[in-house]
Structures are given as C-alpha cells and as structure tokens.
C-alpha cells in the first residue's frame, strides 16, 4: 500500500472514531502534543491506558462476582478507569464508567454486573481500533524512515 | 499523527536555570500526559506516583520550583501533601497546584485556603499549564 493510502486509511479511522464517540477532544489535545521531539507520545499513552484498563477490568470482574459486593472498592476502581479514560479521550468508556458509578452508589449488584459488561464492550471496541491505529502509524513511520535512507 | 504544535512555549527556561516541576499522580496515564505537557513548554519534570515519594524527593532535591499533584491518591491525598509542604519551613515557599477530575467547590476552597496556588480540573490541557507559568518560584 502506498504511503498516501496508508495516511488516508489512518485519517479515515480517526475520523470514524471521533464520529462514533469512541474518542473526544482530549485525544486531539494528545495528538497536538506529539511532535518531532516526542514522536511516540500518543502510542505511549495508548499503551499505558490499555494496560491500566485491563488491570482494572480484571479486578472489577472478581469484585462484582462476589456474593457480597464491596461497592466502595468497586467504585474506587471505576473512578480510576473513568479518570484515565478521560485523560486519553476515550469518551464511550468514560461515559460507561459514569453510569457504572451510579449503580455503585445505589449498591445495585445487577446494575453493576451489566455496567461492567458495557464498559468492557466499549473498551475492547476501542482497543481494537487503537491496535489498528498503531499498526498503521508504524507502517507510515517505516515508510518515512525508508525514504530518508 | 504528527501535527503542528498548538501550544506556545511558556518559558520553562529562566535565566541560566531550567524550571523544575515535580508532578505527583498515582495514574500512569496522567503522569505521562502532565509530563509531556510540561516538557513541551521546556520545563524539567520529575514524576512520582505518591505523596510519600514526593516528600522523599523533596528531602533530597531542594531545587523544585513547583509541585503539581493529583488530589485523590491512595495513602496520602494531594491535600495532605499540600498541608505537609506548607507546614514545612524548607518547603513552604514552593507553589503547589492541585489537579482533580471532580469539580467539588468545597474541595477546591479547602485547597486554596490551605495555600494551593491553583486548582486544575482534569483532563489537564496545555492551556491550563501555560497560565501557571507566572507562579513558579
């Protein structure tokens, strides 16, 4: 695939992610912070976010599965995930976390179980697209460095 | 994904020294973002993941021109860190900025009353940081 075609694919992917609400303006802020002195910044943040999110989702799965749910603990983890998704611009994940916290406040176990599934759904959707994004970026950068040699 | 920088440099270099900011946050994502925002304005940045580590570093390294800390951290909150800094004769002159993802007026007032320089709502943006540049020690 040509460099131009790769760039077009990446742009289309990004645009669709904004339109579908997977990403919000905060992600644009992160893109603007990436430059020649920090070319891997967005990839770094995405990687950190995914590691963090998966760690938290694993914990949440265990906690919400208990016979007696510790809603405070659950809420603390959801708060963390809400924070990092907000910082990376992961809009749908963030909104799902906000809903989740409502159920925690109500001590609603069924609500929490459902909310966790919704968060996972949005997270894994996003992660797939992030994976594609990073692959495209890598291919584009490989082209650029080949052209310079 | 590279694009022209939208932020203008805030003067992280003053006279012959680089301004050193200590950023405290238990979230690895937030540490990466705040560090990048500060470094893009030419500040020297050290990040730590707890109030306890922040105090350890401050004990060893006196040349910190600003502390920017998350409010909600396990073990020691940003508010508790702020209080300790302001009660210390060696550290009290260092401006402390609090960051939080929650807009709680009581919390904000309490921090400002305790001597916080400013209170930033997360997610933090370059424009939030550029307004801090005049407050560095």
Image (spheres, grey):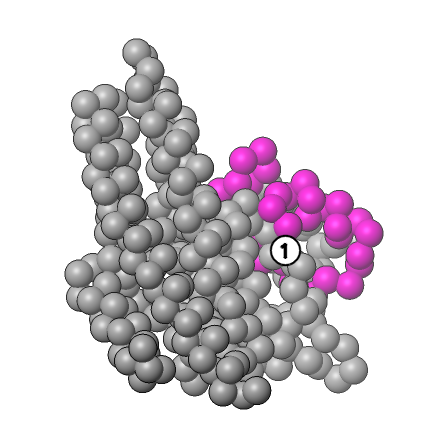
Q: Position of residue A129 (x, y in %)?
A: 29, 58
Is B62 within the magenta?
yes
| Residue projecting furthest to the bottom | A148
| Residue projecting furthest to the top | A67
Quarter that holds the C terminus of chain A: bottom right
Say whether residue A81 is visible: yes
Q: Position of residue A104 (x, y in %)?
A: 28, 29
Among the 4 quarters of the image, the one containing residue A76: top left
A115 or B98, which is in the foreground?
Answer: A115
Q: Position of residue A60 (x, y in %)?
A: 36, 29
Q: Position of residue B32 (x, y in %)?
A: 53, 59
| Side of B89 relative to A12 (left or right) | right
Residue, x 59% and y 37% (percent of image)?
B76
| Residue projecting furthest to the right | B60
Q: In the image, is residue B13 above or below residue A108?
A: below
Total number of numbered discs in the rendering: 1
Residue topped by disc 1: B47
A11 or B36, which is in the foreground?
Answer: A11
SS at circle 1: strand
Residue, x 41% and y 82% (percent of image)?
B3
Q: Start and end of the magenta stretch?
A: B48-77
B86 or A53, which is in the foreground?
Answer: A53
Q: In the image, is residue B9 above or below residue A67?
A: below
Among the 4 quarters of the image, the one containing residue B53: top right
Residue, x 39% and y 64% (percent of image)?
A135
Say whether residue B121 is visible: no
């Amino acid at each position: 695939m040509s460099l131009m075609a790769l760039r077009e694919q990446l742009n289309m992917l990004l645009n669709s992610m904004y339109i579908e609400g997977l990403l919000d303006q905060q992600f644009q802020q992160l893109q603007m912070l990436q430059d020649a002195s920090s070319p891997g910044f967005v990839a770094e943040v995405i990687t950190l976010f995914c590691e963090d999110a998966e760690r938290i989702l694993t914990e949440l799965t265990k906690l919400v599965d208990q016979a007696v749910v510790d809603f405070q603990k659950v809420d603390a983890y959801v708060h963390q995930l809400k924070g990092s998704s907000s910082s990376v611009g992961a809009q749908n994940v963030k909104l799902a976390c906000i809903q989740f916290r409502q159920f925690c406040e109500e001590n609603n176990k069924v609500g929490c179980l459902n909310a966790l599934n919704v968060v996972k759904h949005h997270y894994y959707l996003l992660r797939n697209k992030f994976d594609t994004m990073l692959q495209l970026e890598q291919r584009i950068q490989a082209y650029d460095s080949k052209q310079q040699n | 994904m590279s694009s022209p920088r939208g932020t203008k440099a805030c003067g992280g270099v003053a006279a012959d020294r680089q301004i050193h900011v200590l950023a405290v946050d238990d979230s690895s994502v937030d540490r990466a973002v705040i560090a990048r925002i500060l470094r893009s304005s030419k500040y020297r940045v050290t990040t730590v993941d707890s109030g306890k580590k922040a105090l350890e570093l401050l004990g060893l390294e006196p040349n910190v021109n600003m502390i920017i800390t998350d409010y909600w951290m396990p073990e020691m909150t940003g508010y508790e860190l702020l209080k300790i800094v302001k009660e210390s004769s060696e550290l009290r002159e260092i401006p402390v900025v609090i960051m939080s993802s929650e807009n709680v007026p009581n919390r904000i007032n309490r921090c400002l009353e305790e001597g916080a320089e400013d209170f930033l709502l997360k997610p933090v943006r370059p424009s939030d940081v550029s307004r801090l540049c005049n407050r560095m020690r």
